[in-house]
């Protein structure tokens, strides 16, 4: 569940900024294939990319985390995240 929230958030923000996967990848100095894998829920961004990714998408790391936590099912205590 958490991975789908992260994937959906990345894609939603990227699309709202009219960025292609390739353009976002260039901002992060990674391949567009990595962005595709994130958005298809095949992998997560590396922790070292969280700050550059949040800057590129125009959100803070805390805002991104809050959105992901809000999307958790009620059965998962937020303190576990």
Image: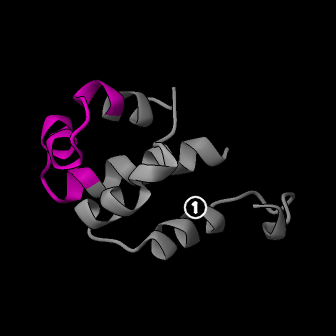
- Figure quadrant of the C terminus: bottom right
* Residue found 28% across the figure and 66% down from its top: 55
Q: In the rendered image of this protein, does residue 42 appear above or below residue 5?
A: above
- Magenta: main secondary structure: helix
How is the structure coloured here?
one colour
* Residue found 78% across the figure and 68% down from its top: 78
**Which region of the structure is painted magenta?**
14-34
Looking at the picture, tell me which residue is in the foreground, 32 or 7. 32
Looking at the picture, tell me which residue is in the foreground, 20 or 74. 20
Kindly give the residue lying farthest to the front in the view shown: 48
Residue 77 screen position, x and y as percent: 85, 65
**Residue that mark 1 sits on:** 68
Quadrant of the rendered image containing residue 9: bottom left
On screen, residue 17 versus residue 7, left or right, reads: left
- Magenta stretch contains residue 59: no
Q: In the rendered image of this protein, does residue 27 appear above or below residue 30?
A: below
- Figure quadrant of the N terminus: top right
Residue 47 screen position, x and y as percent: 51, 50
Per the image, label 1 sits on a secondary structure element best described as helix
């Amino acid at each position: 569940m958490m991975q789908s929230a992260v994937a959906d958030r990345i894609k939603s923000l990227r699309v709202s900024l009219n960025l292609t996967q390739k353009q976002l990848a260039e901002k992060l100095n990674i391949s567009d294939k990595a962005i595709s894998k994130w958005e298809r829920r095949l992998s997560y961004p590396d922790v070292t990319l969280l700050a550059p990714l949040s800057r590129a998408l125009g959100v803070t790391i805390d805002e991104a985390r809050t959105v992901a936590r809000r999307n958790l099912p009620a059965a998962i205590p937020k303190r576990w995240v």
